[in-house]
Amino acid sequence: MGLMGRKNIAPSHALLLCPCSSVHMCFMRFPIDVAFVKRQEEGEGWQVVKVARGLRPWFGIGVCTEADAALEMGMGEAERVGIEIGSILEEVQREANF
């Protein structure tokens, strides 16, 4: 379900959906950025293979067939933290109860 049904997501927070290679914005209440990522073969972390910025509620869709996962975050967060194709991301904190 990702961020569907939530009213927002806090700045500097994101939700990793794994496995996931596409997202839709049906039933979403706010715009988001999505970084599609692929698990690194050596070591830990994820490599960004596509960035979908500003997906709008009800109208947006993002697809990346080579992605292993999708990282959903508030609109503008990808640019704010410098996420771009080729970036390597590490999991900082995992929360079981989202």
Image: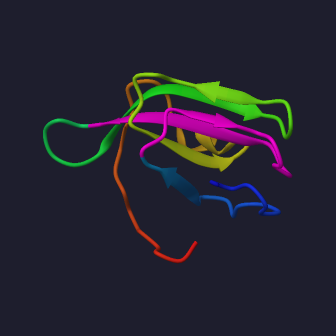
What colour scheme has been applied to the protein in the rendered image?
A: rainbow
Q: Residue at x 67, y 59 (%)?
A: 11
**Which quarter of the rendered picture does the N terminus lie within?**
bottom right
Residue shown at 48%/40% (left/top)? 20
- Image coordinates of residue 39 in percent, x first then y, are 29, 39
Q: Eyeballing the image, is 51 above or below 75? A: above
x, y percent for residue 92: 38, 62
Horizontally, residue 44 falls left or right of residue 10, namely left
Q: Quadrant of residue 43?
A: top left
Given residues 23 and 7, the one toward you in this image is 23
In the image, residue 58 lies in the stretch drawn in magenta? no
How many tags in the picture? Answer: 0
- Looking at the image, the residue that sits furthest to the bottom is 97
Quarter holding the C terminus? bottom right
For the point 55% across and 56% down, the residue is 15
Look at 71% across and 28% down and name the residue there: 61
Which sits in the foreground, 6 or 46?
Answer: 6
Residue 27 lies in the magenta stretch: yes
Give the magenta part as a residue range: 19-39
Image position, residue 44 (x, y; %): 22, 49
